[in-house]
Image: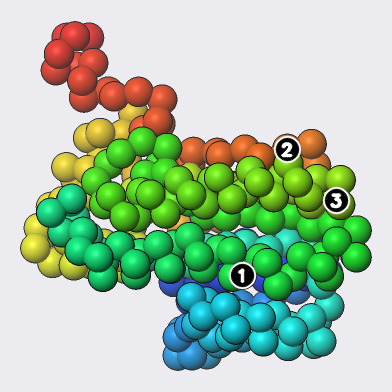
Amino acid sequence: MFGLEDKHVVISGAGGGIGRALVDAFKSAGARITAVDRDSALLAALEGVDTECFELTDHAAATKAAEAILARSGAPDVIVGNAGFTRAEGMASVTPEVWDSEIAVNLTGGYNLVHPFLPAIKAAGGAAIVFISSVNGLAHYGNPAYSAAKAGLIGYARSLAVECGRDGIRANVVCPGSVRTPAWAHRLDKDPGLMDEVSKFYPLGRIVTPQEVAQAVVFLGSPLSGGITGVALPVDAGLMAGNLRFVREIIGA
């Protein structure tokens, strides 16, 4: 259906909540998966995939890993930059250490994932690159360092789209709204009812699932989206469309 049968897909952050959904979705589409993560235990839990364990914030380690992946499986047809992390809540929490850490994981990690593969995918005639950013990259919903990094990831994707398009490379971004993953655990420990409150801000009355994010990524990674590049696609239950709570409470609709 998607034209991804036997295509080679590299997925970073593959052991996390969205990462596992991405692995399952691309496997269901018939792709060959190279799952990348820094946690070997999370990778060991994945079945039917090749794995590569390394620290994505380390450019030398990422380059060495890319060389191993190319030698084993050939150039990727799709690269999914999914690795990401945040814990900072607001501006007062953003220390220099927090800033450096979140930029390293959420922005530099995307560059380190893609850059070592560029010569090979250009030589192979191109590839589809899809980054997982966030609605925080489109508007501010807290987490300043994370927001800056995710906005930067959109900029990097558009740079790839413009400068590498003639090499057959497409680059797009999926911007999820809130997604129930382990990243929410520390907040839910403090307030188990938080998700009910969060859902009130979404026009669909709920947050999106990891599977819904993965389905959008599969589409953007497939030939079905062959004319789409440089796009930042919200998968956010309508959050970026407008503020339903404002409409109801202020306008009275």
- The residue depicted at 48 percent of the width and 49 percent of the height is 152
- Three-letter code for the amino acid on which mark 1 is drawn: Leu
Q: Secondary structure at mark 1?
A: helix
Q: Earlier in the sequence, mark 2 or mark 3?
A: 3
Q: Secondary structure at mark 2?
A: loop
Crowd rating for badge 1 (residues with CA inside 10 Å; few <14, some 14–19, many 20+) = many
In the rendered image, which residue does mark 1 sit on?
113
Crowd rating for badge 3 (residues with CA inside 10 Å; few <14, some 14–19, many 20+) = some
Q: CA distance from mark 2 to mark 1?
A: 21 Å
Front residue of 123/209: it is 123
Q: Which mark is residue 228?
A: 2
Q: Earlier in the sequence, mark 2 or mark 1?
A: 1
x, y percent for residue 99: 30, 62
Above or below — where is 155 with respect to 4?
above
- The residue depicted at 83 percent of the width and 78 percent of the height is 74
Crowd rating for badge 2 (residues with CA inside 10 Å; few <14, some 14–19, many 20+) = some
Q: Quadrant of residue 104?
A: bottom left
Above or below — where is 142 with respect to 106?
above
Q: CA distance from mark 3 to mark 1?
A: 18 Å
Q: Give left or right: position of 219 versus 92.
A: right
Q: Quadrant of the C terminus?
A: top left
In the rendered image, which residue does mark 3 sit on?
168
Q: Secondary structure at mark 3?
A: loop
Q: Give left or right: position of 120 versus 249.
A: right
